Amino acid sequence: MVSLFLAALLLAPPTPPHPAAPASEGWRSARFGMTPAEVVAAFPGEAVLMSPEVKLADGNVIAVRIDAFAFEGLPFEVRFVFAGGKLALVSLRTPQRTYVDAGAYTRLRDALVKRWGPPLEETADANFIDLRQARWNRGANRADLKYIPGVVAIVHYPRPAAQ
């Protein structure tokens, strides 16, 4: 999953936020296991097939995108990552040409705590570069909030079976 996050983080005009999908199913209208066509159909007028698709080093594919989505007042680019043709991960990343300071991470973390409760775990490392992460288990899903200088990302994916 780390390579999926890094690829989605590196790849990456707001729209109104939508209610979240039930924690056991996915993100918004997306459900893990959907095909690219099903994801596009779940977000009419918002999601589009990527042409060409972006093949990641691990063999997974970024096949669907939403270029503008707002969450808690921040703009995000959304990328849908597929493994074996099935939705495996949803990445929300602040736009590549926009620098986001650490305060945005803190605001998002606080908003997610209000929605989901305290994170399962949190890590930070400022030895070399300011890295921060918070993780929530949400039923059958997991969500990671990540910050590296200039970038905030929220990654939704199915929770590992052993977790």
Image: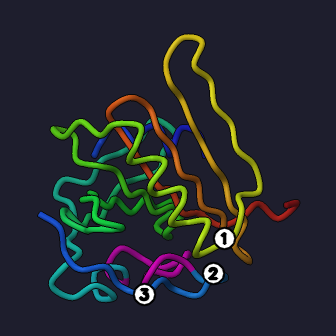
Q: Which residue is mark 2?
A: 23
Residue at 60% over, 61% down: 143
- Callout in the foreground (3, 2): 3
Q: Could you tell which of marks 1 and 2 lies nearer the N-terminus?
A: 2
The residue at the far top in this view is: 128
**Would residue 30 be counted in the magenta stretch?**
yes
Looking at the image, residue 38 sits to the left or right of residue 3; the answer is: left
Q: Is residue 31 magenta?
A: yes
Q: Nearer the viewer, mark 3 or mark 1?
A: 3
Q: Amino acid at mark 1?
A: Asn
Q: Quadrant of the C terminus?
A: bottom right
Q: Residues within 10 Å of mark 2 (few under 14, many from 20)?
A: some
Decide: marks 3, 2 in contact (CB < 8 A)?
no
Which residue is labeled 1 in the image? 141
> Helix, strand, or loop for circle 3?
loop
Contact check, label 3 and label 1, Cβ < 8 Å:
no
Q: Position of residue 158 (x, y in %)?
A: 65, 67
- Residue type highlighted by circle 2: Ala
Secondary structure beneath label 2: loop
Q: Position of residue 63 (x, y in %)?
A: 31, 61
Q: What distance separates the C-alpha of mark 1 from that of mark 2?
A: 6 Å
Residue under label 3: 19
